[in-house]
Image: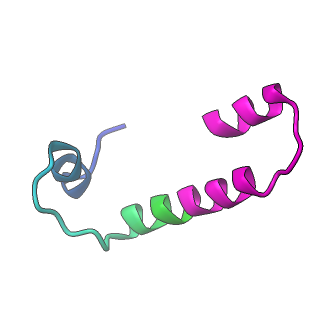
Amino acid sequence: MSLSENKQKMRRGELYYAFTSELIAERARCKHACVRYNTVGEAPRRQLTQMWRE
């Protein structure tokens, strides 16, 4: 899978356009994953580890 030009620039620390559909979708996915992880409550370490990797 090749990275988009904007994503490559982002990873190199260069200026890039942050509002491409790809980057917006990735931020939304990350936000959802963080909310799930932070609201799981008491959970076994194995489940937390699996959630972190996702």
Q: Judge left or right: residue 17 versus residue 32.
A: left
Q: Residue furthest bottom?
A: 19
Indicate the quadrant where residue 12 lies. Answer: top left
37, above or below 32, in the image: above
Which residue corresponds to the image point at 85% horizontal and 50% vertical from the top-left?
41
Indicate the quadrant where residue 23 lies. Answer: bottom left
Indicate the quadrant where residue 32 lies. Answer: bottom right
Q: Judge left or right: residue 25 versus residue 33.
A: left
Q: Where the N terminus falls, by quadrant?
A: top left
Which residue corresponds to the image point at 63% horizontal and 55% vertical from the top-left?
34
Magenta stretch contains residue 5? no
Magenta stretch contains residue 48? yes
How many discs appear? 0
Rendered location of residue 5, percent (x, y): 18, 53
Regarding residue 37, the answer to whether it shows in the image is yes
Which residue corresponds to the image point at 32% horizontal and 70% vertical from the top-left?
20
Q: Judge left or right: residue 30 versus residue 5.
A: right
29, above or below 37, in the image: below
Rendered location of residue 52, percent (x, y): 64, 37
Q: Which sits in the foreground, 48 or 17?
A: 48
Q: Where the C terminus falls, by quadrant?
A: top right
Regarding residue 54, the answer to whether it shows in the image is no
Q: Which sits in the foreground, 17 or 37?
A: 37
Rendered location of residue 13, percent (x, y): 15, 49
Q: Which sits in the foreground, 25 or 12?
A: 12
User: Which SS does the magenta portion mostly show?
Assistant: helix
Q: Which residues are magenta?
A: 29-54
Rendered location of residue 28, percent (x, y): 54, 66
Q: Residue furthest top?
A: 46
